[in-house]
């Protein structure tokens, strides 16, 4: 396992850089008697808009800094655009690659051969083999679930498939598509593509509104599956207890509506509630605490603007019946996969949310208290990597994959 230089960059009037050694780089612990005070916000760039947040702390919250000594190691490299990562019961990692491959990576960083039996993906644009998760009963069922972009009549769709990982781990057996998010679109953008089991054992899926101006408004319609969180059974049927939407023609699989391109999903380890990251346009990246039956506003309300600089819709950020993001970024960081920390190695991280940032090229740590974001930290800023997904391993460490093909292990230093 190859250790790499690692420095934290944080803002507190001036930039302070931690010293780096040739191998394992650790952050020196702060003496226990030192009083930890809030730092300046980690974002120092000018926003793209002059929009006013709906409440104090909705954006540019005070910075925080991890006090424990952290070690970051490059566990594996040479992956081809990895997109999703999850931990197997024995501690190994199951990873998807955008082009349509799935691999197992050992705890020592050995990358396995591609697993066969995966249905064909359309890897054009933002499509491909996307997020994945394993069955809560994987130890006995060996079932794997994944999201992918599928070419169908009329264009492309976000599809969900499942299959059994063979005993010899060389193939997926009996791969079956259990859900297709219709309608199809010619776009190869905004697939969403994350999936996670909720606290009741039902499958939560994120879908994007496919980016085109003609499909964007469909995020507000309950008669289609674009720009939504979907809640289904392991067989792809509408889950029991789904909310009832009052509009005509509402799909029974819907959990929430009004999303743009949600690329992160995580279940809070205490409340069991769904949290989600969502790409905004130019400004307006969001973190949402998603509640059943709620409308999260896109494209009617947003804290972002068009890439051209024009306002979106009426240029409003609040509207009756539409939920506010728990937190947003302007300028964007492009938040992707995310996970809650529920280990005990680093107590100050307990129940904190960790999010991979693509354009931001760092990992976000958000401190959450009473469903409010109270602190933000940027980790691994010195690596220049687009962090696509992050998960917690069975050993309590965090594991993150990047578009550049790297797998990093983030753990408490033993020094």
Image (spheres, rainbow, N blue to C red):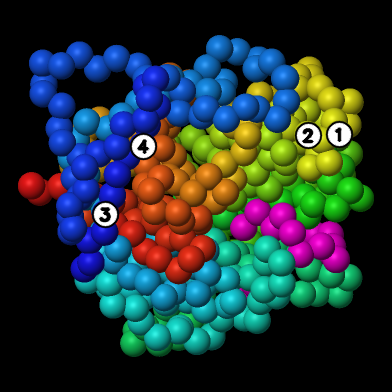
Return the residue at label 3: 5
**Placement of the N terminus among the 4 image quadrants:** bottom left
Question: Which numbered dot is residue 305?
Answer: 2
* Left or right: 327, with 214 as reference point: left
Please provide percent x and percent y for residue 280.
Answer: 69, 40
* Left or right: 241, with 390 as reference point: right
* In the image, farthest residue toward the right: 214
Q: CA distance from mark 3 to mark 2?
A: 37 Å
Q: CA distance from mark 3 to mark 1?
A: 42 Å
Q: What residue lies at 81% left-to-right and 22% top-to-bottom? A: 316
Above/below status of 114 relative to 238? below
Q: CA distance from mark 4 to mark 3?
A: 13 Å
Number of residues whose C-alpha sits closer than 10 Å to that of mark 3, classed few (under 14), some (14–19) or many (20 or more): some
Q: Are marks 4 and 2 in contact (CB under 8 Å)?
A: no
Q: What residue lies at 17% left-to-right and 52% top-to-bottom? A: 21
Marks 3 and 2: which is nearer the front? Answer: 3
Q: What residue lies at 36% left-to-right and 37% top-to-bottom? A: 9
Number of residues whose C-alpha sits closer than 10 Å to that of mark 4, classed few (under 14), some (14–19) or many (20 or more): some
Q: Are marks 2 and 1 in contact (CB under 8 Å)?
A: yes
SS for tag 4?
strand
Please provide percent x and percent y for residue 185.
Answer: 84, 62
Return the residue at label 4: 9
Quadrant of the image occupied by residue 272: top left
Question: Which numbered dot is residue 310?
Answer: 1
**Magenta stretch bounds:** 175-193
Above/below status of 47 relative to 3? above
Q: Are marks 3 and 2 in contact (CB under 8 Å)?
A: no
Does the segment drawn in magenta span residue 139? no
Q: Earlier in the sequence, mark 2 or mark 1?
A: 2
SS for tag 2?
loop
Quadrant of the image occupied by residue 120: bottom right
Q: Earlier in the sequence, mark 3 or mark 1?
A: 3
């Amino acid at each position: 396992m190859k250790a790499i230089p690692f420095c934290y960059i944080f803002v507190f009037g001036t930039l302070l850089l931690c010293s780096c050694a040739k191998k394992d780089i650790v952050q020196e612990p702060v003496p226990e008697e030192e009083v930890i005070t809030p730092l300046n916000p980690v974002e120092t760039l000018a926003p793209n808009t002059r929009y006013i947040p709906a409440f104090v702390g909705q954006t540019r919250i005070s910075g925080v800094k991890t006090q424990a000594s952290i070690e970051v190691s490059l566990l594996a490299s040479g992956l081809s655009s990895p997109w999703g990562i999850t931990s197997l019961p024995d501690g190994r990692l199951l990873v998807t690659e955008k082009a349509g491959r799935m691999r197992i990576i050992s705890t020592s960083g050995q990358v396995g051969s591609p697993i066969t039996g995966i249905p064909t993906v359309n890897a054009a644009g933002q499509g491909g083999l996307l997020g994945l998760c394993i069955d809560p009963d994987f130890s006995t069922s060996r079932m794997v679930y994944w999201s992918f972009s599928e070419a169908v009549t009329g264009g492309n769709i976000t599809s969900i498939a499942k299959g059994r990982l063979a005993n010899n781990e060389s193939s997926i057996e009996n791969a079956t598509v259990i859900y297709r998010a219709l309608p199809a679109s010619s776009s190869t953008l905004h697939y969403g593509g994350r999936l996670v089991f909720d606290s009741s054992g039902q499958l939560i899926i994120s879908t994007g509104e496919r980016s085109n101006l003609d499909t964007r408004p469909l995020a507000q319609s309950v008669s289609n599956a674009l720009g939504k969180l979907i809640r289904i059974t392991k067989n792809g049927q509408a889950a029991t207890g789904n909310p009832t939407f009052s509009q005509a023609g509402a799909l029974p699989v819907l959990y929430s509506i009004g999303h743009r391109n949600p690329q992160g999903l995580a279940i809070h380890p205490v409340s069991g509630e769904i949290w989600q990251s969502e790409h905004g346009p130019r400004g307006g990246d969001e973190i949402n605490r998603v509640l059943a039956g709620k409308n999260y506003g896109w494209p009617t309300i947003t804290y972002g603007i068009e890439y051209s600089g024009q306002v979106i819709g009426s240029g409003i950020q609040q509207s009756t019946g539409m939920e506010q993001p728990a937190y947003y970024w302007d300028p964007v960081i492009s938040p992707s996969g995310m996970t809650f920390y529920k280990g005990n190695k680093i107590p100050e991280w307990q129940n904190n949310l960790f999010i991979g940032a693509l354009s931001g090229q760092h990992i976000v740590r958000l401190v959450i208290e009473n469903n409010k974001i109270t602190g933000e930290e940027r980790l691994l800023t010195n690596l220049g990597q687009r962090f696509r997904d992050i998960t917690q391993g069975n050993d309590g460490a965090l594991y993150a994959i990047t578009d550049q093909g790297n797998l990093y292990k983030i753990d408490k230093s033993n020094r």
